[in-house]
Image (cartoon, coloured by chain):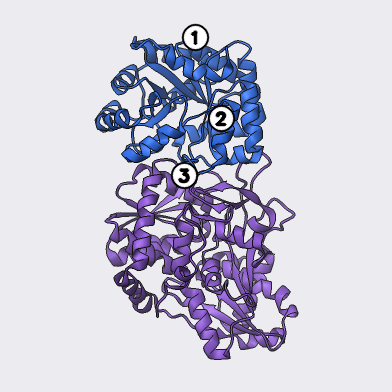
Chain colours: A purple, B blue
Amino acid sequence: MNSMTTQQKKASLPDQRGFFGQYGGRFVPEILVPALDNLNNAFEKALQDENFRQEYDTLLKEYVGRETPLTYAGRLTAHYGKAKIYLKREDLCHTGAHKINNAIGQVLLARKMGKTRIIAETGAGQHGVATATVCAYFGMKCIIYMGAEDIRRQKLNVDRISLLGAEVRPVESGAKTLSNAINEAIRDWVSNVEDTFYIIGSAVGPHPYPRMVREFQSVIGKETIDQCLEAEACLPHHVVACVGGGSNAIGMFSPMLEFEDVKLYGVEAAGEGIQTSRHAATLTGGDPGVLHGSLSYLLQTAHGQIAEAHSISAGLDYPGVGPEHSWLRDTGRVAYSSITDQEAIDGVKLLSALEGIIPALETAHTIAYLEKLMPETDTDEIVVVNCSGRGDKDMETISKYMPS
Amino acid sequence: MSKNNRIQQLFQQRDPDHKIMSLFITAGYPDPAQTVALIRELESSGADMIELGMPFSDPLADGPTIQNASKVALEQGVHMDSIFGMVRELRRYSEIPIVLMGYINPVLRYGLEKFFQTASESGVDGVIIPDVPPGELPELTGLTDTCGIDPIYLVAPNTSDERMKTIDEYSRGFIYCVSVTGVTGARDGEEVDRSVRKFIQRVRTNVTKNPVLIGFGIRSHKDAMNISKEVEGFIVGSALIDVIDKYYPHEDWIARAGSFVKALRSGEKTEIAE
């Protein structure tokens, strides 16, 4: 398995300055400019470095447990009676979600750069757990910034992070969720830029982060292509992934972008409904602006202040989105839509009952989207859903929606 | 007097022994109705220039003091037009150079061109947008030129010699020299002193076009004099806001802020300047 070649073949976007069309860039304080230059150089070098690739691929295989299966969802398929549905099982990665693919790549890069201190933000806690896990594996100091509200609703992951030897720093500003945790992580990086490596968990942030996260997550899409070809002798016709910042989606989509016949669907969190102010559907209900170092769609007020997002799923509860998704939205290559909190809960129940898989609340948004997508499909088509994470961490939230 | 040249005139007319003292406050903090009165008090207490912060919900280069000031200002409804209103009101009384400082998103939302035109018409002299490094928004250069607004950029201790030269090229008015790596916030005097000396030498060598002011971390007259020996002046932000926090809403909070500034300038002790 060689997981880092496709992007090099068509390395047109982002451009040299980190732009996907008008989106992306490097909107950061001057102090971070040299740090981002160094990071970009190290990343470019790593891409060409056979040893780096081997180390990365070996860890994915022997530590993460890749490749993850592409599971035929027979009862879910029968439920809709339309296209065949497959699940890309990122929930079976070590630590329970796709986040570790990227955490491993970035920690390896940090080690190459001689950085000794790792910081990260986390929303649902999956990226925090993945980063803490990899830091434990390599014996590195690790600090995780997490919104106080997310600490409350993702308690299990907070305990996991602590057990793994990382420090969780609660963030009390704003809505006390993912966006505020990123602010605080950036502040830490600005203050400790010499010895610290900031591992961003989503396809957001200043250049080169969106590209780097895409590269380290693109193993999802590459495996899916191979597995689908093997199982069905064709590419999938429809591919669905959830989008908060958009790392699992870009990892799934990017190797498929060149295949025009593969229809791609990104599913955002509509929270209590996009007609309300309580949602996180950035691409559906937002406007372009600058947040966390890049220009992209975001939820904002008439005066350009960042609006608070809302979603039942901490991992999607973010007012921004990765800049490449903004580009893919505007070009129409990916169709973005949104799913409410209640629909997501129904998605959890459906997948649990029919396939014996309890999905993360983030992932449940993609399952719920099948209600809309499946009637449009044909019986000779293939649908792949990216099952980005497992639901153990969400059981407390999910329990509230179960009959007592 | 041409309103475009207030910053340049300030530096041209400076007595070599006089250090330019630029003060940062957040527009509308703690009380939007008193921002103009506060600026006038700061000016009469010895301020040479005012950096007026445009509050933003997600100020990722600022420490707790300015984060809180931004939050309070936003809660009181401060937005771009109210900030321009403050500057216009101030211009009825004062010719002190005004630099607007804030993050790019509210500026983009307001409209880049409209922002610079309105800034110019309102009597703003310069702009600092800390999350837009030189060249990141190419249209900025043209707009600052046509509107006669000085674009002011930052250099940091980790900025390379070559990049300092680039930043000097892009800047007009002055260069804002961040003396301690980190987010804004006052620090103790000794740390400032240690970290700064070699850095200033590098800035002096590479920045040849613009005057240099040093900020981030100055709390006292002694800090200010130590740090600005080799440059044209200094900037105080968080320490001033800390003083305001301490006395607001006491009825003489503005006068107390003025006393702090007089002490920053003269070194004479007042009851609040430690």
Identified by mark 1, the residue type is Ser
Which quarter of the rendered picture does the C terminus of chain A lie within? bottom right
The answer to whether residue B71 of the structure is visible from this angle is: no
In front: label 3 or label 1: 3
The residue nearer to you, when weighing A47 against B130, is A47
**Tag 1, which chain?**
B
The amino acid pointed to by label 2 is: Asp
Instruction: Tell me how far mark 2 sits from mark 3, CA to CA.
Output: 23 Å
What percent of the width, then of the height, locates residue A187? 42, 44
Q: Is residue A12 above or below residue B168?
A: below
Give a yes or no on whether discs 1 and 2 share a subunit: yes
Disc 2 secondary structure class: helix
Residue A146 in the image: state x and y as whole percent. 46, 53
In the image, what residue occupies the spot 44% across and 20% down? B22
Query: Is tag 1's residue or tag 2's residue first in the polypeptide sequence?
Result: 1
> To which residue does mark 3 refer?
A28
What residue is disc 2 on? B145
Q: Residue at point 60% right, 27% down?
A: B147
Residue B44 tag number: 1
Q: Chain of mark 2?
A: B
